[in-house]
Image: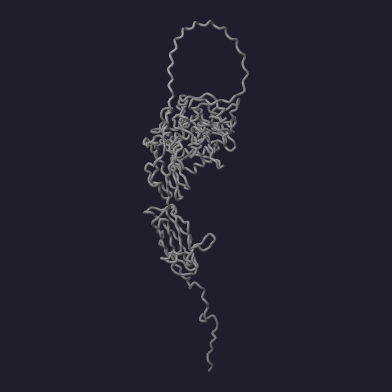
């Protein structure tokens, strides 16, 4: 049977009040300062983080166990195994992280340092969230590839004490075709995994039950929206976006600071296991061998029972009310999606789209619906993304029933693509928006030097041609260009004589394609050579957008004075052969 939140976990759930008290005790030494507008609210209250997206976990229950007050300072001579009878320091045991799980966190940090360096994600934050969400994959119950040996599932999000999130994956990940459930070591709900999932171990599969995939996905999730996790505000926003609860924030921050003070690797399957959960439930403990029963004591002599008091007459039970029809959720009332005034979506490659997509949720009666989650997905062959580098964004409709997608950022791939809007948790037709990325352009080209370009026949030009491209006076970077040695000013046909370039094999080339200006709008052409034809020749450079520059090249005859002179009779090289007439 599928396990729910960790078989083998100890009993004894910590209450919210206990957790809050422990956090308060830790705050002086183990939690980062949170001041001003970033100060958490009272324990148990959700604190909006400004994001309109649902949390990664659907605000599912989490483990409330707190780290020990003592800093982790394990000694190599002390056993790291939590097996019965082995003396292990509490701080050292809690600082142990299963080897495969720890490796997954560190690899995710390395990947994010390259792909999103401004995020400054520490692997200890992933470890803190992994501890709170699943007890480090139930103490490291993973196989050699990092996949959990059995599924880790949160409770069904059926609205009964939890958020109401109807099935979005047809039970693919959670086995539940009615409601969604949080899945895996990092407890992603299927609707979030659909866009946040990553392949962290390179096997070609995005599996929320694999700790490498889940850790990398969690890292990208925490790094979206351009949050800088080295700041208090960025760190707080990222954690609250994962589970929007102040108690959750405090618990994760406590483990983060604890892990920052020292951790060590322990064998998979031997990590310490949490016991308390935020919903007040304690996960079941596996059956153990029964102990030898103790000898029963002799029962004491019963005392004479006291005279019972006269019971009061029972009250007449009230008539149970007839259960009514369940009140439909806002999502249930949506009949279609409609555009809410989105302008034409066009951007130049590498730049942000000037307009955002606006979509409204509408009932069959034409009324707009608030508090409905709309998912925007970029479809097609494009490297365009939403702000933060994601291909999917989920936004909740506002009081007027409108959801505004994050700004689109064009990549370098030009052409058309589609952004599709759908309702999360309801199967109705989506709404497609056409978007287009146009090439970068330039309207002006100028040489960066005024030196005349000359060469003797059969030689090479001393100076290379360099030009600068601009668009409306601004630098035009990454603009495509072509350079051709043409026959004449009014004849753009490629010349068959005169100056030329060389390809990688040293062969003559008189047209260069695939050129592009650099970040400063500069384009430096390869070295030019000359054949034996003398005269004035033209090099024409053109860019996307219509900018054109024609450069003159002069090839002169070789200097004859440089040739070795032949000796002449007048040089006195030998005796004169003339004879004077006889007398």
The structure's colour scheme is one colour
Q: Which residue reaches farthest right? A: 292
Nearer to me, 447 or 2: 2
Location of residue 388 by image quarter: top left
x 60%, y 37%: residue: 144
Q: Is residue 368 above or below residue 581?
A: above
Nearer to me, 224 or 530: 224
Residue 360 percent across, percent down from the top left: 39, 39
Q: Which residue reaches farthest bottom? A: 583
Residue 536 percent across, percent down from the top left: 43, 68
Q: Is residue 21 above or below residue 495?
A: above
Residue 389 percent across, percent down from the top left: 46, 43
Location of residue 403 by image quarter: top left
> Is residue 128 shown to the viewer in this render?
no
Residue 425 percent across, percent down from the top left: 46, 35
Nearer to me, 470 or 68: 470
Total labels: the figure holds 0
Side of 267 where 540 appears, left or right: left
> Is residue 347 shown to the viewer in this render?
yes
Location of residue 426 by image quarter: top left
Query: The N terminus lies in which quarter of the figure?
Result: top right
């Amino acid at each position: 049977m599928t396990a729910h939140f960790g078989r083998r976990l100890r009993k004894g759930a910590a209450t919210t009040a206990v957790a809050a008290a422990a956090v308060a005790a830790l705050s002086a030494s183990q939690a980062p300062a949170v001041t001003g507008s970033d100060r958490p609210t009272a324990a148990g209250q959700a604190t909006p983080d400004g994001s309109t997206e649902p949390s990664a976990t659907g605000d599912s229950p989490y483990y409330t166990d707190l780290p020990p007050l003592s800093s982790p300072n394990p000694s190599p001579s002390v056993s790291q195994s939590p097996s019965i009878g082995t003396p292990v320091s509490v701080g050292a045991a809690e600082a142990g992280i299963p080897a495969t799980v720890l490796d997954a966190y560190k690899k995710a940090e390395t990947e994010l340092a390259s792909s999103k360096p401004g995020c400054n994600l520490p692997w200890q934050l992933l470890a803190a969230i992994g501890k709170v969400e699943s007890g480090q994959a139930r103490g490291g119950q993973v196989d050699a590839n990092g996949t959990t040996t059995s599924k880790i599932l949160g409770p069904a999000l059926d609205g009964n004490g939890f958020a109401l999130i109807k099935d979005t994956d047809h039970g693919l990940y959670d086995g539940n075709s009615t409601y969604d459930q949080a899945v895996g070591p990092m407890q992603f709900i299927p609707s979030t995994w659909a866009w946040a999932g990553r392949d962290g171990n390179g096997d070609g599969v995005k599996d929320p039950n694999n700790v490498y995939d889940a850790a990398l996905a969690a890292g990208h999730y925490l790094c979206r929206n351009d949050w800088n996790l080295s700041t208090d505000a960025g760190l707080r926003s990222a954690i609250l976006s994962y589970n929007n609860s102040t108690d959750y924030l405090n618990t994760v921050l406590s483990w983060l600071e604890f892990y920052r003070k020292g951790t060590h690797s322990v064998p998979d399957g031997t990590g310490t296991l949490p016991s308390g959960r935020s919903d007040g439930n304690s996960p079941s403990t596996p059956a153990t061998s029964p102990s030898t029963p103790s000898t029963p004591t002799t029962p004491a002599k019963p005392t004479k029972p006291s005279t019972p008091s006269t019971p009061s007459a029972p009250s007449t039970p009230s008539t149970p009310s007839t259960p009514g029809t369940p009140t439909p959720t806002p999502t249930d009332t949506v009949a279609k999606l409609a555009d809410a005034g989105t302008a034409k979506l066009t951007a130049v490659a590498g730049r942000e789209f000037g307009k955002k997509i606006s979509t409204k949720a509408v009932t069959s009666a034409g009324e707009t619906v608030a508090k409905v989650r709309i998912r925007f997905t970029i479809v097609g062959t494009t490297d365009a993304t939403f702000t933060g580098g994601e291909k999917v964004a989920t936004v909740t409709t506002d009081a007027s029933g409108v959801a505004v997608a994050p700004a689109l950022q064009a990549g370098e791939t030009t052409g058309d693509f589609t952004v599709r809007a759908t309702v999360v948790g309801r199967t109705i037709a989506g709404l497609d928006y056409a978007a287009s990325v146009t090439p970068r352009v330039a309207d002006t080209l100028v040489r960066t030097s005024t030196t005349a370009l000359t060469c003797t026949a059969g030689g090479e030009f001393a100076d290379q041609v360099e030009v600068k491209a601009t668009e409306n006076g601004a630098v035009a970077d990454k603009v495509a260009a072509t350079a051709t040695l043409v026959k004449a000013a009014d004849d753009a046909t490629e010349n068959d004589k005169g100056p030329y370039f060389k390809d990688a094999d040293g062969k003559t080339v008189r047209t260069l394609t695939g050129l592009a200006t650099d970040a400063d709008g500069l384009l430096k052409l390869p070295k030019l050579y000359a054949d034996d034809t003398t005269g004035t020749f033209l090099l024409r450079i053109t860019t996307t957008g219509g900018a054109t520059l024609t450069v003159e090249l002069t090839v002169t005859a070789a200097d004859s004075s440089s040739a070795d002179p032949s000796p002449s009779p007048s040089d006195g090289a030998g005796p004169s052969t003339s004879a004077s007439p006889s007398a």
